[in-house]
Image (cartoon, rainbow, N blue to C red):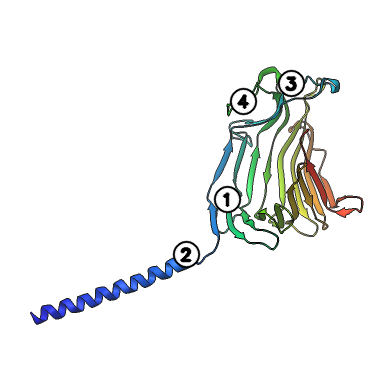
Amino acid sequence: MKMFTKLALVSSIAISANAMAMQSMDDAALSSTTGQDGLNIGIGISKVTIDQLAIHDNDGLATANGGTGEAGAIVIKANGDGTNGTVAHGVEITANTSSLLASHNLADLTIDTDAGTNGAFLNVGAQVSGLVIKVGEIGVDKSNDYTTGAVVRGVEGGSSYNKILNGLTITTGVMDANIQLGSAPQGAMIKLNSTMQGGLELSNLSIHDGSTNGGGDIVLDSIKVASVGSSDLALDASVSVTTGGLKITSNDATGNNIYIKGVHLGSAAAGSIGDVEVSGLRTYYGLNGTAGSQITITGH
């Protein structure tokens, strides 16, 4: 009986010790979790596709300017079955496997709220993996009438449709962006101040002439953009939404080098007239000639 009592006592002590150890570990884990202010989100999407994208201009172009005043749309749609450089959807977005985040996520977000010096704000730091964005055929078409409550409007298709671009591919590298909503002490809603690894590349770009006397294409095999003296592309830009519209300001004073490879006139099968190189391209804006550029987008 004494032996049984001792065994029970030893077992009780062991169980209690284990329970205490487990409780201590849980407390530490909980403290670690709750002690990390803010929120981290990893977006683990491997592919995004859009079958068709349409941007409708509801009042068209005034008749006085040669239009009909009827609604038209810019349409992006598939230009093939996904083989031989074609796109099976209007837009396809996948990760650039040669320029990935360490997490291999499409994007990693770090979200914080702050009291701010001049008012509270929400801060979203975004790291974005390198992307391969394939855009299918781009054209213009007549918009269908909008039905109240509908989520699909569509376009007429058929003889009213005209192609503008045969398609293109955009390849980017890893980059950072910072978004602030509220007082935005960084001075803009979105701030890009990082380096895009490997620069920016556009490929399979083909502009179509759909005029009566046209029918041919201007084909550029690829366009590569990088900062002067680097194989990467420096990003220094801000995006603000003003009461008048969207304002995009670039503060790049370094300048960029651009290399256009393979310029074909008439069709992709036509012989190339050669390559085009632009070195040290810089832009300026404003009366005082500030280095960079400023683009505003408004409705009318």
Q: Residue furthest right?
A: 287
Q: Quadrant of residue 246?
A: top right
| Residue type (three-letter) at the residue carrying disc 1 | Leu
State the residue position of label 3: 70
State how far apart marks 3 and 4 are (Cα): 15 Å
Asked whether 156 or 133 is in front, the reply is: 156
Badge 4 amino acid: Arg
According to the picture, the residue beneath numbered tag 1 turns out to be: 106
Question: Whole-Å distance between the Cαs marked 4 and 1?
Answer: 30 Å
Residue annotated with mark 4: 153
Crowding around mark 3 (Cα neighbors within 10 Å: few <14, some 14 to 19, many 20+) is: some
Q: Earlier in the sequence, mark 3 or mark 2?
A: 2
Residue 103 visible (yes or no):
no
- The residue carrying pointer 2 sits among few (fewer than 14), some (14 to 19) or many (20 or more) residues within 10 Å by Cα, namely few
* Mark toward the start of the polypeptide (2 vs 4): 2
Q: Give the CA distance from mark 3 to mark 2.
A: 57 Å
Which of pointers 1 and 3 lies earlier in the amino acid sequence?
A: 3
Above or below for 134 versus 117 = above
Q: Amino acid at mark 3?
A: Glu
Residue 217: quarter of image: top right
